[in-house]
């Protein structure tokens, strides 16, 4: 398991997924599920996010776990 940081680009409240840019990544953005413990009001574009990556290299094994 790894903890990564990124920047929130947009949030979809219907699916509770965020489009984020991972720090240090060449990829422009990726869709990541968001923990339901994070209130929608906190998920504003431009904020920093903490992403738990359970298996390295598997983009389906990530979740936004923190926002600041």
Image: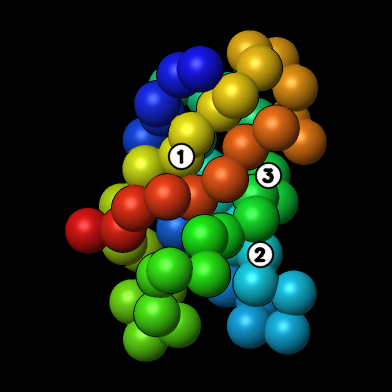
Q: In the rendered image, which residue does mark 2 sit on?
A: 17
- Residue at 42% x, 50% y is 65
Question: Disc 3 to disc 2, how far (Cα)?
Answer: 10 Å
Badge 1 crowding class, 10 Å Cα cut-off, few under 14, some 14 to 19, many 20 or more, is many
Question: Disc 3 to disc 1, how far (Cα)?
Answer: 12 Å
Q: In the rendered image, which residue does mark 3 sit on?
A: 30
For marks 3 and 1, give the one nearer the viewer: 1
Q: Position of residue 12 (x, y in %)?
A: 66, 77
Seen in the picture, residue 24 relative to 21 is either above or below; the reply is above
**Front position in the image: 58 or 26:** 58
Q: In the rendered image, which residue does mark 1 sit on?
A: 51
Q: Earlier in the sequence, mark 1 or mark 2?
A: 2
- Residue at 37% x, 35% y is 5
Mark 1–mark 2 contact, CB under 8 Å?
Answer: no
Instruction: Residue lying at the far front in this picture: please name it.
Output: 37
Seen in the picture, residue 45 relative to 29 is either above or below; the reply is below
- Residue at 65% x, 72% y is 16
Seen in the picture, residue 30 relative to 67 is either above or below; the reply is above
Seen in the picture, residue 67 relative to 45 is either above or below; the reply is above
Disc 1 element? strand
Residue 62 is at least partly visible in this image = yes
Disc 2 element? strand
Disc on res. 7 = none
Q: Position of residue 20 (x, y in %)?
A: 54, 50
**Colour mapping:** rainbow
Badge 3 crowding class, 10 Å Cα cut-off, few under 14, some 14 to 19, many 20 or more, is few
Q: Earlier in the sequence, mark 3 or mark 1?
A: 3
Badge 2 crowding class, 10 Å Cα cut-off, few under 14, some 14 to 19, many 20 or more, is some
Q: Position of residue 66 (x, y in %)?
A: 34, 53
**Image check: 15 left or right of 1?**
right
């Amino acid at each position: 398991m790894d903890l990564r940081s990124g920047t929130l680009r947009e949030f979809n409240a219907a699916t509770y997924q965020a489009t984020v840019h991972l720090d240090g990544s060449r990829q422009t953005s990726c869709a990541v599920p968001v923990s339901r413990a994070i209130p929608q009001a906190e998920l504003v574009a431009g904020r920093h996010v903490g992403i738990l990556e359970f298996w390295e290299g598997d983009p389906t094994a990530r979740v936004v776990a923190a926002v600041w």
